[in-house]
Image (cartoon, grey):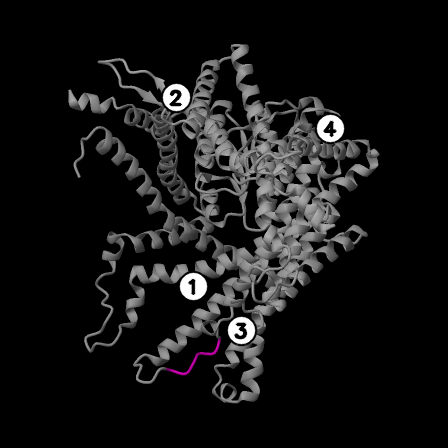
Amino acid sequence: MEYIRHLFNPILLFGALGTMAILSLVFKENRFYRVFEHVFLGLALGYDLEFTWTTILRPLFWDAMVRDGQWAWVMTVPVGLMFYGIYTQRFTWMSRVVFGIFFGLNAGAVFQDFAGRVVPQVTKSFLPSKSLIPPPPIPGDPHALLHQISFVLNNFLFLGIVVSVLVYFLFAFEQKNKAVLRTAQIGRWVLMFAFGAIFGSTIMTRMALLIDRMYFIFHDWLRLVKG
Amino acid sequence: MLHTLQHFFAPMPGHGAWYFEKLALGLLFMFAILGALQLAPRRARKGIIAFFTFLGGAYYAAEFFWPTNSATNQNFLTPYQDTVAGLASVVGSFAIGLGVISLLQNHTRQLARRRPGWGYSAIFLVFFLAMTVFGLMNAYSAKSTVIPAVPGFWARQDAHGLFQFLFVGGLTNLGSATFAMIAFYIASAAYRAFRIRSLEATLLMIAALIIMFGSVSFGTWLTHGIHPVLADGSENPWANLRIENIAQWLMLQVNTPAQRGILFGLTLGLLATSLRYWLSLERGAYFEKEL
Amino acid sequence: MQHASENWWVSGLVILLSLIIVGKVLLAQRGRVPFIRRISGLNAIDEAVGRATEMGRPVMMVPGISGLDVVTLQALSIFSYIARAVARFGNKSIIPTIDPIVTGVAEETLQDAYADAGRPELYDSGDVRYLTGQQFAFASGVAGIIVREKVAASFLFGAFFAESLIFAEVGQQVGAIQVAGTTETNQIPFFIAACDYVIIGDEFYAASAYLSRDPTLLGSIVGQDYCKLLLLAIIFLGLIGVSLLNVPFLAHSSLFSHPLHWVVDLLKVK
């Protein structure tokens, strides 16, 4: 009786049915999936509304304006209304004014992003550890020569990969010049190898997610698995 | 002048004299600006949009480039960052209606015309309303009773409990399930990539296998016979061929520089595209339409 | 780096790169239309749209799952070319969106593209569908659209994250021709495994120029190329610098090592 009551615990039951419905899509689309897809979308949209109100509009706009008396926030209302111009013939163009402000806000942040994110990657490409001439050997190292050779080879490889990938991404130069064409081809192969590495490192984390859901069904809900 | 302005815009916590007048004035002022924009000649519209787009970008650009006070690492624009971000998120939030209207339109149309699948639209609407109502109730009065207790059947349910049912039972679990679906799809994608007999697909799968084997115990068992140290206590150069070392080398010496090459291209693309938007140089149907 | 004044050399570099790009755009607008190389995945667009029309099934375009940013806008501008092809063939497009503002811009873009192709009547207000702001709810909704509408061509352009594989594999299940491109490098391998054509890295930003052959956009691409060469040159110079510092004779002579250190550290940010 206790077990039956546990199985019908609303939160667990909702979660378990939903999990099975969603995962069933992997085999074939079916009504069970469709029902829970619409449940999911409904919940998500409702949550979006609630979240937008409680975390953005209420604290930043409503409370600021009404409780704290920052009356100027009222001026954002007409600006927000401009979005709705798209529903009319006459004011459609006005929505583009406010879209434009958002285009601008996004675009203006690019300078800081570039300086803060890209330039350090440029300088990292010529750290002392990337030198093409090996540093003097560490005294007493039995494999000193081997270390120096691998240091140089690794760094030439590193540079070669950066260069070939960048050459692959050159668009303005016709890849008819044999040197450009070959370098770009090598760049593409290297890219595939690098993408494979990303693929391989993601597989295990994705499997962990599935195992977690199986644990939810078989341990938390059905209690068929102990531990 | 600045002082008068500051005084004019100052918060009025107690809703002192002129609070409501100022609210009305603020609305009127903004609507007057909108009216003026609407009255502007048609050929000026592109210019107006370009002006506001430039203005939107100018704040962040100027805030970045304007020299800072070396002690505080701030310039005169830095203190307004929160205000600008707040303004953007408030105005942006008003747009949520665009999405909600588009969705409700679709689903109510399905329902009203009893199109095939209208039942799903009904389910959507029920759960949407439930989440919105109980979500907001949970934020304002979490303890208020929604369903009174019926002895022998169920206990009293308050708004918080129902919100938990929808949020934890529904939303969170459905999200995790969707995420977990990817485990199946990654397997079928890998299987397909294995079957493609091209040099590129082969390279991709070889690298994927090496990395995968390098991170699971079966993989490392394959090369565990290569000892990291030699009999005389010095490091064994052949240990570089242990699968976990090959995998690590692949990540550091192949993946890192390749990603860097991609990053340079991508971020330059971002820079160029941002500049085109900011300076209204962009082309395409949306940007070239007569307004 | 929060402000330009932390390292003026770095900021100078950003300004220089920006000027190169804008300069190339302005030159191209004055009639010096440049050449750009083939981007193979993009030639498949007409084929995919044509096939979808023959099968009597719609074309789906997903502009990624980030809000209104430059990446999403770029995706929408690629879609405006695809939508023109859709309109020419008289087919139907579906654009699911995750952000309300993007929904508005997407509606405008689709209408303008149809009008441009001379078929404004093809536009239907249900074509652009806002689903929700949440990643996996959106993914499950898009998966539902793909299977129920049996989309015959699916274009995935923009910023995608873990859900990329859901779109691509469900598309595979219904046999859609899929063309994808994303700025999120970590998702490209999954698109390669599950889509028919994938554009990689900043081919994404070159796509609208390639499709439209518009001088402004082409000029911008050429500007980007010059910037890449400039970054490469800086890396080469820096590498020569750090390598010379490992030559014992130079490393010990302050006459050489001081200026070398200065040059190598020029672009360093704390």
Q: Counting other residues with Cα less than 10 Å from the Cα at mark 2, is it few (<14), some (14-19), or many (20 or more)?
A: some
On screen, residue A10 above or below B63? above
**Which of the 4 quarters of the picture holds residue B10?**
top right
**Which of the 4 quarters of the picture holds residue B231?**
bottom left
Image point 48% across, 14% down: which residue?
B118
The numbered dot on residue B253 is: 1
Whether A211 is among the magenta residues is: no
Query: Of the residues shown, which amino acid type is indicated by label 2?
Result: Asn
Q: Is residue C147 left or right of residue B218?
A: right
Percent x, y of residue B13:
57, 38
Q: Quadrant of the N terminus of chain C?
A: bottom right
Question: What is the C-alpha distance between the residues marked 4 and 3?
Answer: 57 Å
Q: Is residue C237 visible?
A: yes
Read off the residue under disc 2.
A30
Q: Secondary structure at mark 1?
A: helix
Query: Of the residues shown, which amino acid type is indicated by label 1?
Result: Gln
Read off the residue under disc 4.
A91
> Label 2: chain?
A
Question: What is the C-alpha distance between the residues marked 4 and 1?
Answer: 55 Å
Question: What is the C-alpha distance between the residues marked 1 and 2?
Answer: 46 Å
What's drawn in magenta, residue-wise? Answer: A132-137
Query: Mark 2 or mark 4: which is in front?
Result: 4
Question: What is the C-alpha distance between the residues marked 1 and 3?
Answer: 17 Å
Marks 1,2: beta carbons within 8 A = no
Q: Counting other residues with Cα less than 10 Å from the Cα at mark 3, is it few (<14), some (14-19), or many (20 or more)?
A: many
Is circle 2 on the same chain as circle 4? yes
Image point 69% across, 34% down: which residue?
B26
Query: Mark 1 or mark 3: which is in front?
Result: 3
Q: Secondary structure at mark 4?
A: loop
Percent x, y of residue C126:
59, 23
Read off the residue under disc 3.
C239
